[in-house]
Image (tube, grey):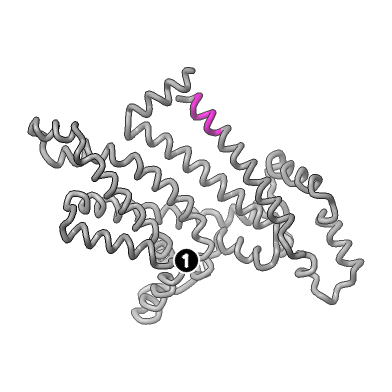
Amino acid sequence: MAKYIIKRLILCIVVIFCASIVIFTIMYFVPGDPVEIMMGANATIAEKDAMRHEWGLDQPYLIQLGSFLYNVFINHELGISYTYNAPITTEMMSRFPRTLFIGISCIIVDVILSIPLGIQAALKQGKWQDRVSTIFAMACVSVPDFWFALMLVILFSQILHWLPSYGIGGLQYYIMPIMANALAGIGGLLRQTRSGMLDVMKADYITTARAKGVPEKTVIHKHMLNNALIPVITVIGGHFGRAVAGTVIIEQVFSIPGIGQYMLNAVNTRDYPVIRGGVIILAATTSVVMLLVDLVYAVVDPRIKAQYIGKAGQ
């Protein structure tokens, strides 16, 4: 098992390395000159050329790419922000906990709401509980999260005055961002749970367990749910990446100083090092989460654990 984990960690590094090359290449060839934006039209050509030389923007593509990869993977530095003239690593580490808190909270909300509703919808297939859950799931997937966020602000801040509309502080500042960011995840996870439960409900081992007189609650929670959770866990891992990346819009709506807002401001000002650093952080986070998802498989299904041990032995 340890060898398998080491192999997956190496694969994560490869993924992050490839993501770094891709995002650097995109930012290199994207239209727009950060020097023109930063210095404005009043700066002379000599001043602009001096700033390009200072930032290394006058170097060829391969030299800039090699310098970037060396700083990231050897020096563990993401560079200096063009706009703030400050180390990006320090700024990212101060903002990342807020973004991560929103992402983890979204997944918790998704699991608490979606899995029980999905189980109930499958057990009551074709009945009103199933129809209500299906409509609810479709509404969650269809409603844009930024529109839902604005509606939450109008209702809970402007009308009811229960929650603050923006900024950071206590937990009350995160309630609406978490609700808005978790919306689409609730719908997708509910549908996947319902589908997974329906797939295992008619399996032979379920019929055998009921024929032996096993209590229905035991059949549902021990036999059905364990096998139905395999695809659900995959969806949860994917939703975590989406929840973290989705904070780009949510943090902007609620003025939360996280990675999402930092990256969005960088896009508007052509602050390429910040964009590259944000993508690398998100890629690393998603890679680690997907590794954890693979390990959770082994906890839920012993057969998968046996396969992991077998692969590690080979």
Residue at (34, 79) in percent of width and height: 160
Label 1: few (<14), some (14–19) or many (≥20) C-alpha neighbours in 10 Å: few
Residue at (34, 39) in percent of width and height: 230
The magenta stretch spans residue 218? no
Residue at (72, 64) in percent of width and height: 83
Give how far across and how far down residue 244 sits, in percent: 49, 55
Image position of 17 with respect to 122: above or below: above
Q: Looking at this view, is 102 or 42 the one in front?
A: 42
**Secondary structure that dominates the magenta span:** helix
Q: Could you say which quadrant of the image residue 11 lies in?
A: top right
Residue kind at label 1, given as amino acid type: Gly
Q: How many marks?
A: 1
Report the residue marked by disc 1. 169
Q: Looking at this view, is 130 or 55 the one in front?
A: 130
The magenta stretch spans residue 5? yes
Secondary element at tag 1: loop
Give how far across and how far down residue 75 sits, in percent: 71, 41
Q: Could you say which quadrant of the image residue 214 lies in?
A: top left
